[in-house]
Amino acid sequence: MMKSYGQMIREALDEVLNNDPTTLIIGEDIGIYGGAFGITKGLLEKYGPHRVVDSPMSEQAIVGFGIGAALNGLKPIVEIMFMDFMTLCYDQLFNHACIFNYLSNGRLPVPLVIRVAAGAGRGYGATHSKSLYAPLMHIPCIKIVAPSSPENVKGLLKASVQDKNPVIFVEHKLLYGVKGNVDMAQDYIPLGKAKIARKGDDVLIISYSKMVNDCLQVADKLDKEGISVEVIDLRTVKPIDIKLIKSSVEKIGRVVIVDEGYGECGVASEIVAKINEHCFYSLDAPIRRVCSLDVPIPCCPSFEKEVIPSCEKIESAVRGMVNE
Amino acid sequence: MVPIANGIAFANKYKKNDNIVVAYLGDGGINEGYVLEALNLAVVLKLPILFVCENNLYAMSTHVDRSHSAPIHQKVKAFGIKCEVIHNNDFIKLDSVAKRFVEEVRLYKEPRFIEVRTYRHYGHSKNDLNLYRDKDEEKFWFEKDVMKIVEEELIKSKELTQDDVNKLKEEYQAYIDSIAEDVINLPEHTEKDVLKHVYAE
């Protein structure tokens, strides 16, 4: 059966609300309006205002609220409308959410999920388009999940809700309408495990979220020319599955990392560092990165396209790698 | 931590367990954006929480008169939260207000707020020489030291004798000492445990 990424998120939320009375969702415009992207439509009517809570525009207060509710036996799912607005809740994340379990010697876990929409490509402009994974990766003791498809988004969300740690669940706004065959979709996908989305021999691309789809398109195209590309879908950005990355790097030796975030101190930089630490001598050529340019994300379509990674840029990086 | 206290209060209401949260904050903290967000949210979601602001006049070195656009209780009332002010460490009034508010929070499932005007007798930290406030002010508040006025009041009202007070003080000092000793005698952490509990399993 074909279903969209957005539908699968809604199904996951519906199932966890239905099966676990300790779960609730809170966020701006998630109830009556049904969510900025329509993901939570119908859930208020089905579960009532005490479990589908429309909040004021107070990102810090609702993330803190989620931490408190999690400390007191509930499993809150907080929605932050755009990843750009995560900047408003850094204090709650850096100074609070991540400290309780460790500092209490494991007595105070914080089973909190924060759902948030990231990504550019729709002309939403500088304050509604960013992929700010990197600053969040700097927080210890949390997990960051980045589903790439209708097949994995539900299983990853259900696993995130089941997890006892703060999990930032990053959805890509360009994927919401993307449909896929979900007959083989797993109900739970363990966090911290990457997946080989396509096997290949000549070049390895490591990516996550929506960019995985672009990488797969490029791989298809190059395959016809006899260039065999392997694609790893990280699925979880923190903790990174270095074991799987290492085994592919050792096999292939040529690596391109595709990351929609900024290049400076980014997810890709971290992967480069980890490859250096774990399997540097398996590399046949320097690692290449395809990241967003270090500028605010423009509204103007031609500029926006130039700023974020594209199939063309990925293709050119892979071709450059083959010729090296 | 104020937003977190809200979440704990919400969970109590959600579980219908009749518990309430008492959240303590300071005069400095009231100027943090997240505290203002949290006060608003506590009203909007009707949370069973009692906020107690210990207004000791100074946020580190900054006096409330130099940092607040209006008195704290006025700001709180603007959020629609019922608020009482306790002046000069008046612990008898504080006791009765606190009891009433605890009952109201539990009954009506909505926030209450107490602004306690009190004082920080010593510096903000051990490096703080208190150069930003005058000695008369410090003296005035030392006279109103809660420990001192509670003791005087209890003896005056014949609830306790001076001997009782002395005995209680000795008992509590011994109790505190014993806890300190227990903690000091706990085994040291070993380095091998430093990466324990990074993630909850």
Image (cartoon, coloured by chain):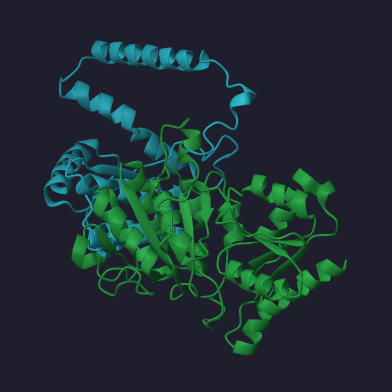
Chain colours: A green, B cyan
Q: Position of residue A12 (x, y in %)?
A: 35, 59
Q: Answer left or right for A131 relative to A319.
A: left
Answer above or below: position of A190 versus A211: above
Q: Answer left or right for A72 relative to B110.
A: right
Q: Position of residue A152 (x, y in %)?
A: 47, 59
- Farthest residue toward the right? A324
In this view, the residue in front, A268 or A7, is A7
Residue at the (35%, 33%) spot, across then down: B145
Q: Position of residue B104 (x, y in %)?
A: 13, 47
Residue at the (55%, 31%) spot, across then down: B196
Q: Position of residue A255 (x, y in %)?
A: 76, 60
Q: Answer left or right for A276 relative to B104.
A: right
Answer above or below: position of A145 versus A212: above
Tell me, yes or no, if residue B5 can be seen here: no
| Quarter assignment of residue A108 | top left
In this view, the residue in front, A247 or A77, is A247
Q: How many marks?
A: 0
In this view, the residue in front, A238 or A90, is A238
| Quarter assignment of residue B38 | bottom left
- Farthest residue toward the left? B107
Residue at the (49%, 52%) spot, across then down: A93
Tell me, yes or no, if residue A221 can be seen here: yes
| Quarter assignment of residue B65 | bottom left
Residue at the (45%, 66%) spot, across then down: A150
